[in-house]
Amino acid sequence: MEIGTRDAGAGRLVLSPVGDLDMAGTPAFDRVLDGVLDRPGLLEIVVDLGGAAFLDSTGVAALLRGAAEAVGRGATLRVTDPQPLVARVLRITAVDALLGWTDGRDDDGTAVEPGWRRLR
């Protein structure tokens, strides 16, 4: 797991994990996230999931922990640009909205009503 970090200005940081956010990759993500959370003046963490090919329950837990820690420090954490498999995990675990990602589409491209998830 590689995690790129870049300053997006005005208290915003972008984390870009590349690889799998799973049991093996999550500890590295947690270390980087903890370092980012300690930065003074932090307002928002954007986790760009475009390079994350897989997300399991440990990855979901790490994202939720990071979001809770960010809120406790007066900041926010949100995810962007998930791969289709990662987007599906975010939707079926119903954490997409909690993590600031709501595209309003199901896996087959059909619109999904807010609050409802279709499991197959």
Image (tube, grey):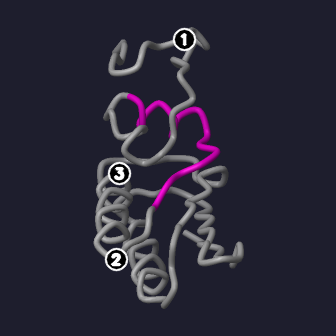
Q: Give the range drawn in magenta.
A: 77-91
Badge 1 is on which residue?
111
Rendered-image quadrant of the C terminus: top left
Distance of mark 2 from mark 1, alpha carbons?
A: 35 Å
Q: Classify 10 Å Cα crowding around label 1: few (below 14), some (14-19), many (20 and above).
A: few
- Pick whichever, 30 or 77, lies toward us: 77
Q: Element at badge 1? A: loop
Q: Classify 10 Å Cα crowding around label 2: few (below 14), some (14-19), many (20 and above).
A: some
Badge 3 is on which residue?
60
Badge 2 is on which residue?
73
Q: In which image quadrant can residue 67 be found?
A: bottom left
Amino acid type, mark 2? Arg
Distance of mark 3 from mark 1, alpha carbons?
A: 23 Å
Distance of mark 3 from mark 2, alpha carbons?
A: 20 Å
Q: Which of marks 3 and 1 is nearer the N terminus?
A: 3
Image location (x, y in percent) of residue 103: 57, 29
Q: Are marks 3 and 1 in contact (CB under 8 Å)?
A: no
Q: Element at badge 3? A: helix
Q: Residue at x 47, y 13 (%)?
A: 112
